[in-house]
Every structure is written in C-alpha cells, then in structure tokens.
Image: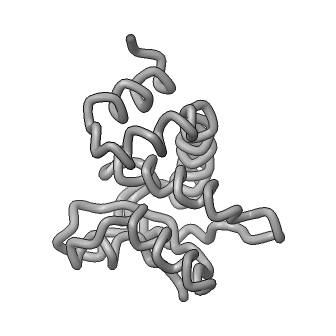
Amino acid sequence: VNMDWQHLLMNGENLGEYAAMLAAEGLLGHQHANSGWGTFDDDNMVGATAFMETLELAVELRRAGYGDNGERLGFDLYPYTEDAVAVVQRSVLHWRFIDSVAARIDDAALREAQMRKDAVRAYELVYAALGAE
C-alpha cells in the first residue's frame, strides 16, 4: 500500500503507527514523502512541518526493514513559489538527517519505554538522539 504522508496527516493518521500496521500485514509499500499543515495536500518539503511525526515514521520504517530490499522514498512535492530543484535537494537532505536521528535512537530502550507507556523516557531517548540532554 502506498503511503502518501500528507494525505495521512490530512486524515489525522499517525504516520509511524500506519507504517507499523502495514508492515505487520506485509503491505508496506511505496512512500510518497512530503509534509504539510494537515488541512490541504500541501506537498511541502520533507520535514518542513510534522518533524516529530516524520521522525517516528523513520523509526518505524527502520524497524520494518524498509529499504533492505531496494525500496526507496518517492518525493511527492509541489513547490508553489520555491525553486523545484532546491526543494528536492532540501527534502533529500532533510530525510537523510531525520533518518540519521532515527538510527541514533536506542531502539531497544525505546521499545521498552513504549511497552511501559513511559512517554518521558521515550522522549529522553529521542532528544538524546537529537543531541539534547
């Protein structure tokens, strides 16, 4: 199943949870990577809005092994006023950064915090990966 990130945000869906559910059913397909404010199909640069939601999605895509078999993100972008090439370049850089943060999160500790429903510990781990105390 194709995941269009902004379409999911418009419908109030949780990106990470949606990816995890699709992966559990063997249905996780192509990714239409973008961002927006959630009320319109903005098709903004990846990470321009919904940063934490996108980071959570990156964690779940890593857990699902997305990319291990050659899967790639597709950027579904519509630069209304920006230079189109710059928007794509920035989206690639943003995704690489977001994915690198996801890679730095201690996943075993995060899973434990999630199982215990310990939001404080989960955010400690996320912010540590971002370089905060």
Of the pair 110 and 116, the residue shown nearer to us:
116
Tell which residue pokes out farthest to the front in this image: 116
- Quarter of the rendering occupied by the C terminus: top left
Which quadrant of the view contains residue 37? bottom left
When the figure is inspected, residue 16 is found, relative to residue 18, above or below; the finding is: above
Residue 76 in the image: state x and y as whole percent. 50, 72
Q: How is the image coloured?
A: one colour
Residue 94 in the image: state x and y as whole percent. 53, 43
- Quarter of the rendering occupied by the N terminus: bottom right
Q: How many marks?
A: 0
Tell which residue pokes out farthest to the top in this image: 133
Of the pair 7 and 116, the residue shown nearer to us:
116
Of the pair 24 and 76, the residue shown nearer to us:
24
Horizontal side of residue 77 vs 26, given as left or right: left
Q: Residue at x 35, y 71 (%)?
A: 6
Residue 69 in the image: state x and y as whole percent. 83, 70
Q: Residue at x 61, y 79 (%)?
A: 30
Of the pair 37 and 125, the residue shown nearer to us:
125
Residue 62 in the image: state x and y as whole percent. 63, 54
Q: Residue at x 36, y 24 (%)?
A: 124
Tell which residue pokes out farthest to the right in this image: 69
Q: Residue at x 42, y 32 (%)?
A: 126
Horizontal side of residue 78 vs 36, given as left or right: right
When the figure is inspected, residue 115 is found, relative to residue 27, above or below; the finding is: above
